[in-house]
Structure formats: C-alpha cells, structure tokens
Image: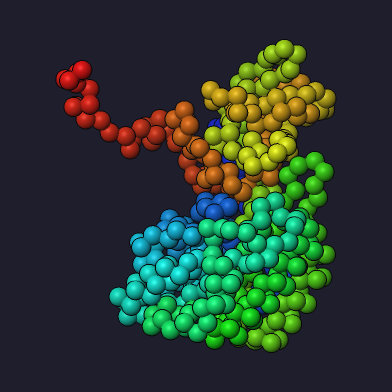
Amino acid sequence: MNWNQIAAEHGTPTYVYDGDHLNQHLRELRAALHPALEVFFSLKSNPNRGVYDVLRAAGARAEVSSLAELRTVLAAGTDPGDIVFLGPGKSPAEIEACIEAGIYALVCESLPELAQIDEAAGRRGVRQRVLLRVNPAFSVKGSRLTMGGKPRQFGIDEATVLAAGPSLGEFAHADVAGVQAYLGTRILDADVVVKNTAYILDLAERIAAATGIRLDAVDIGGGLGVAYFDGEQDLDLAALTKELNPLIERFTAAHPDTRMIMESGRYLTADAGTYLMRVRYVKESMGEKFAVTDGGTHHHMAAVGIGSFVKRNFPIELLSRSAESTESWNVTGPLCTPNDTVAKGARLPSLEAGDLLGVRRSGAYGPSASPVYFLSHGHPAEVVVRHGRTYLVRRRDTVDDVLAKQSTHPDLSTHEGV
C-alpha cells in the first residue's frame, strides 16, 4: 500500500479500505463455516457502497437497518431474496419499501410492529415473511456488549413469544416463519459464540413447538469480535468452527428446509480499514508530546473508547516513512474539545509536521458512527484499494456541501420586538 501516493491523490483525512483483504477474509470465513450457514453482511458496520460491492462479489448476502441501506444493496444488484431488514423502530416507509422490494424477511422486534407489517402487506395483497427477533432470557458472559438476558429495546421477550402460542400464526399477511436472536457483540471467545448459538437453536425449536410457526429461517446473529487493544487476541476461527459446525450439522439434519443465517459486520471489515491522517503540528505541553493532525474523533469516535472504563488506543502507526517507535505521543485532532484525542501515550517515532499516521483496524463503525459535522468539518473521503488500484468510493465533504442544506429567512435577522 503506497500511503504517500494515496494521500497525494485523495488528501487527508481519508478512510482507506483494503479490498483484497475484504474479499479474502470473507472467503476464509465462508470456507471455515458449515456450508449451510449463510453470511449476511451487516451494513451498519460500514454502509459504503464500494465496501459492499467487494463483499457481495465474494458471496455476502445483506442485512440492512435503514431505507438508505436497503436502497444501497438493491442498487448494487442484490437479489431481494438475500436481504433481511432489522431494527427496533422501523418507519412505515421502511416497512413499505421492504414489502415492495420483496425482501426475504423483515425481522420483527415488537408485537405492535408485527401488526403494522400485517397491515402494510395487506394493502399490497401479499404475505411478507417475518422472523421474530427474540430477546432471550439467557446471556453468556464474554461479549463486550451483552444483548440478551436483560430488559432491552431489541426484540420480543422470550417468555412473551412462548406465551403467545398459535396467535403468532394467525395474521393474514405477516407470515411469521422464523426466529432471530443476537446475544452479544465483539466476542473474542469461541466458546461464547458456540454457547450463544446452541441456545438460539434450542430456542427456535421451543418457539416452533409452542406457537406452531414454520422455521423457514433461523438467524443466529453474529457478534464475532476483533481484537483492538493490547492484551486482546483475535477470535480463533478454527476453534470456533470445530464446535460450531457440528451444532449446525445437527440442526440442519433435523430441519433440512430451514435457512441458516449468520450476521457479520465488524469481523469482516474492521481489519481492512485504515484511517489516514496527516500531522499538522507537533508540540510539547508540560512534558508530554502532542501531534495535532487533520483527523480526529469527529471521524473516528470509536478511537475515543466510548463505553469503555479504561481508555485504550487502537493500533496506530507512522506510514509515510520508516522509523523506530521510541517515544510516547498523544495524537489529537482539530476539534475544540480535550476529548479529541485519537491516541494517548502511543509509542511512535519522533514525529514531524507532514507525517502520515494510520489508525489501523478502522474499517467498522468509522465515519457513519461518528459526529462528522462537529465544528462543521464534514465527512472524510473514503477509498477502496483493489488489485493495486485505488478507487474513490466517497468524496470528501466540501464547505459548500456542509452548508448546502442550511437555509435562512429575512425575518430571523430583524430586530423588531427587541
């Protein structure tokens, strides 16, 4: 990767995605998993069309959670039968668009939503397949964010689903025909993923028995983790599939017509992304070295460690030249807040203005999960590098872009009544 050339061509700050790595990583995951288990890419982790194009070409299906994400995957040529739509607060427009497109399934997260899906499908005179998102009564320690076993806005409580009985199958147009559950995220322990999956598969069978619904599909969620910080280790894929694949084999033997779905976002994209920044100034303050860059937490909020008790650095490197990392540096951005610290006490070489720094493992939950309009800076550029060629897949916001949606009115600037 020629970082100096990328910066010269596209400027900084820029997100750079290694398309060859994206392709290879998905292919390795699919080859390791049981062949019945389909991988649906979670666009929430990185909704860039260029990133999705690479993953779709490598065999990914699509899991979307907004109208924009739905339109992205449809525009990319995705078969509607390979799309599922999740989210606890779907708008009527989103539900209508999913039904119109004929997507494989809407994942329903509340009983009122189920009624709304039924009404919307009825207006079109069709039956829409629905998977119930279940909030399990169970949680396994080991995920960085536990999604089950406690009150949540996501899904319908396990007890509520089981108590509903045959009434879930009585809708004329909402065809309840499967189960989805998501128990945690950023899981690095293979045993936790296996235990989660075992519970979900058992839960699906218990729900089918109690309610009489078909099991057209069971979505086991995902949550496969990525190691960002010192002391963490990446998920052992071989150890995972050694235990996971026999579970899937037993379930599919008992339910040969059930589609098996795994969602994956961060695991597929994180390691393929680098946030590229240029150092503007270097300085010392009370004995500490600071490198002030043109990038910052408005583009990479995850680097702040929001939600972590201990703030730790994402991997960060000097990319524009070779030098030994010997000094402690605080890497900060242009924002008027002390929270705009991308890395604190990072071991880096002696830095100079003009150096290029790269925050590694930045391919997931980057600009789309950051306050890109703080101080009116706008969205960074995004590029994909594939087969040695660099493709601009999102241009940088200009000042005119940032201001274009604002409007003023003459009455607002008068002094009448003051």
**What residue is at 50 percent from the left and 68 percent from the top?**
107
**What residue is at 35 percent from the left and 61 percent from the top?**
93
Q: Position of residue 171 (x, y in %)?
A: 41, 81
Q: Position of residue 253 (x, y in %)?
A: 71, 86
Task: Tell me if residue 264 comes above or below residue 215 in the rendering.
Answer: above
**What residue is at 76 percent from the left and 42 percent from the top?**
229
- Residue 87 appears anywhere in the view: yes
- Name the one closer to the observer, 28 or 219: 219
Q: Give the left or right position of residue 167, taking residue 360 as reference.
A: left
The image quarter containing residue 273 is top right
- Name the one closer to the observer, 92 or 82: 92
Give the total of numbered labels: 0
The image quarter containing residue 191 is bottom right
Q: Position of residue 231 (x, y in %)?
A: 82, 43
Say which quadrant the N terminus sits in.
Answer: top right
Say which quadrant the C terminus sits in.
Answer: top left
Task: Tell me if residue 41 comes above or below residue 403 in the rendering.
Answer: below
Q: Position of residue 42 (x, y in %)?
A: 57, 59
Its colouring scheme is: rainbow
**What residue is at 48 percent from the left and 80 percent from the top?**
168
- Residue 320 appears anywhere in the view: no
Task: Tell me if residue 143 comes above or below residue 4 in the rendering.
Answer: below
- Name the one closer to the observer, 228 or 363: 228
Q: Give the left or right position of residue 172, taking residue 413 as reference.
A: right
Task: Tell me if residue 188 comes above or below residue 255 in the rendering.
Answer: above
